[in-house]
Amino acid sequence: MSDGTLFSMETIPTEAQYQGRLWVADLLDLTGAALVGWGAVRAAEQVSTAGALVLAGAVAWFALSAVGGLTGRTPGRHFLGLRLERGEGRAPGLGTGLLRGLTAPVELLLQVVLQRRPLDTRLGVHARPIPGGARGWVRGLLPQLVGVAVLAGAVWSIVTPTRQEMLQYLDSTLTGWHCCHGTREVTWQCRTSLSRAVRNAKGGDAEVEKLLRAECPVAAARLTP
């Protein structure tokens, strides 16, 4: 066997060179989309039912897939130093990006079993390193920070109480009573509920303001000009 033949047999196909990193990037993006969907449901003061969470997460995922199709980049891919291409350096396009929104979650499972990405191959897309090395990575960072900011806002919505949760905690629980009267150590739930209540009251929420002035002296003190 000649050296040339041996080399050609051991050459890793373009589609397979970065599939491990692409798998991690897809997992990060899918997780981020799920968190954004969850945060959006809470920010809209909706009940976090399974149906609402799945719908909101799907909307976030397909929006991200559309951006990834048009640009080849997503926050997860950028973090891993990759972009998705079709052909020689071309972004996949909107249609392919949306189709990949359907196939990528399935591919996450298939790749574990098959150690390859057959659906990406059918779509004609593959991962490549971001052109330009470290400089190219830095130049492309700013657009991805928008996605990071959206994710941070979603996480904040998840970890802070909704209006209904705040009212129930301050008005209907013993720990909420202690929070309102400052008789116990301040917890995260207490701090965030008080902050939310004060913001709502100052924003013109008459129901919350009435509750604070009547039942929550700690928060009522913050309303005094």
Image (cartoon, grey):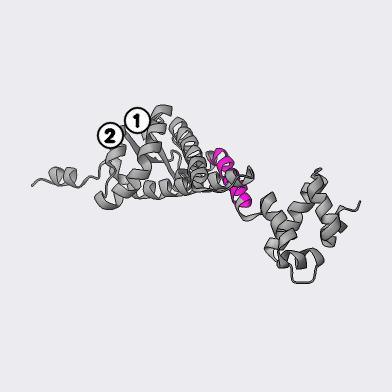
Q: Is residue 168 magenta?
A: no
- Residue at 79%, 71% (x, y): give it: 183
Side (left or right) of 88 relative to 46:
left
Q: Secondary structure at mark 1?
A: loop
Relative to 92, say whether 188 is above or below. Answer: below
Q: Is residue 136 visible?
A: no
Say which amino acid is labelled 1. Glu
Q: Position of residue 149 (x, y in %)?
A: 60, 44
Q: Position of residue 15 (x, y in %)?
A: 29, 40
Q: Magenta segment, principal secondary structure?
A: helix
Side (left or right) of 1 relative to 92:
left
Q: Name the residue nearer the viewer: 58 or 92.
A: 58
Q: Is residue 184 visible?
A: yes
Q: Tell which residue pokes out farthest to the front in this image.
A: 172
Q: Which mark is residue 88?
A: 1
Q: CA distance from mark 2 to mark 1?
A: 16 Å
Residue under pointer 2: 122
Q: Is residue 156 magenta?
A: yes
Q: Which mark is residue 187?
A: none
Q: Secondary structure at mark 2?
A: helix
- Residue at 13%, 43% (x, y): give it: 5
Q: Name the residue nearer the viewer: 130 or 96.
A: 96
Q: Tell which residue pokes out farthest to the left in this image.
A: 1
Relative to 158, say whether 86 is above or below. Answer: above
The part of the chain drawn in magenta is 141-157
Q: Residues within 10 Å of mark 1 (few under 14, many from 20)?
A: few
- Residue at 77%, 47% (x, y): give it: 200
